Image: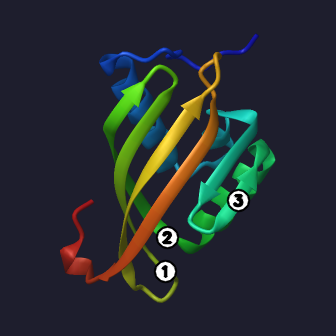
Amino acid sequence: MEQKQPLPPFTAATAVQKVQMAEDAWNTQDPEKVSKAYSEDTEWRNRNQFIKGREGVVKFLTDKWNKELDYKLKKQLWAFTDNKIAVRFEYEYHDKFGQWFRAYGNENWEFDENGFMKKRYASINDLAIDEKDRRL
């Protein structure tokens, strides 16, 4: 059976590792690569959207990165226990008109026994910023 290391139950070190792996994957802006961290039947709530399955993840991320240009993400471990991790994050991007944004949010993750994320709940707020105010 396929596994995605590290596996739950998480320790402080493995939770930080899982968060860093997610940050690194998302910063590739490769929907296929990112989708491999999620279970085949993954369920997401992202803002007001509900996504199901890896195919849904690929479509969602493809659409996202076609609109959110020069995307750069930073994640930070907030809390963890057993098979769950909570993170805070911020990312920056610009739209096709050149307007920059910084998005802030929190995610709650739940993993299956093989280390794949089966649930992801994200709450996100965007703030328009000037390019000179970018941090990432």
Instruction: Give the secondary structure at mark 2.
Output: strand
Give the residue pinned by disc 2.
69
Horizontal side of 7 relative to 31 (left or right) equals left
Separation (CA) of disc 1 from disc 3 = 23 Å
Of callouts 1 and 2, the N-terminal one: 2
Instruction: Give percent across and percent down for residue 127.
Output: 34, 78
Residue 61: horizontal and vertical position, in percent?
Answer: 64, 57
At mark 1, the secondary structure is loop
Farthest-out residue, top: 1
- Please give the name of the residue rendered at 49% of the width and 16% of the height, measured from the top-left corner: 6
Residue 12, located in which quarter of the rendered image? top left
Q: Percent position (x, y) of residue 33?
A: 63, 39
Please tell me in which quadrant of the rendered image residue 66 appears.
bottom right
Instruction: Name the residue rendered at 27%, 59% in the picture.
Output: 136
State which tag comes first along the sequence, 1 or 3.
Answer: 3
What label does residue 86 carry, if any?
none
Per the model, the C-alpha gap separating discs 1 and 2 is 6 Å
Which residue matches tag 1? 95
What residue is at 64 percent from the left and 16 percent from the top?
A: 113
Give the alpha-carbon distance from disc 2 to disc 3, as whole Å. 22 Å
Mark 3 sits on what residue? 50
Q: What kind of element bears circle 3?
A: strand
Say which of marks 2 and 3 sits in front: 3
Q: Residue 2, can we see it?
A: yes
Asked which quadrant contains residue 124, the reply is bottom left
Work out whether 114 lies above or below 77: above
Point out the residue furthest to the front here: 81
Query: Local crowd at mark 1 within 10 Å, few (<14), some, or many (≥20)?
Result: some
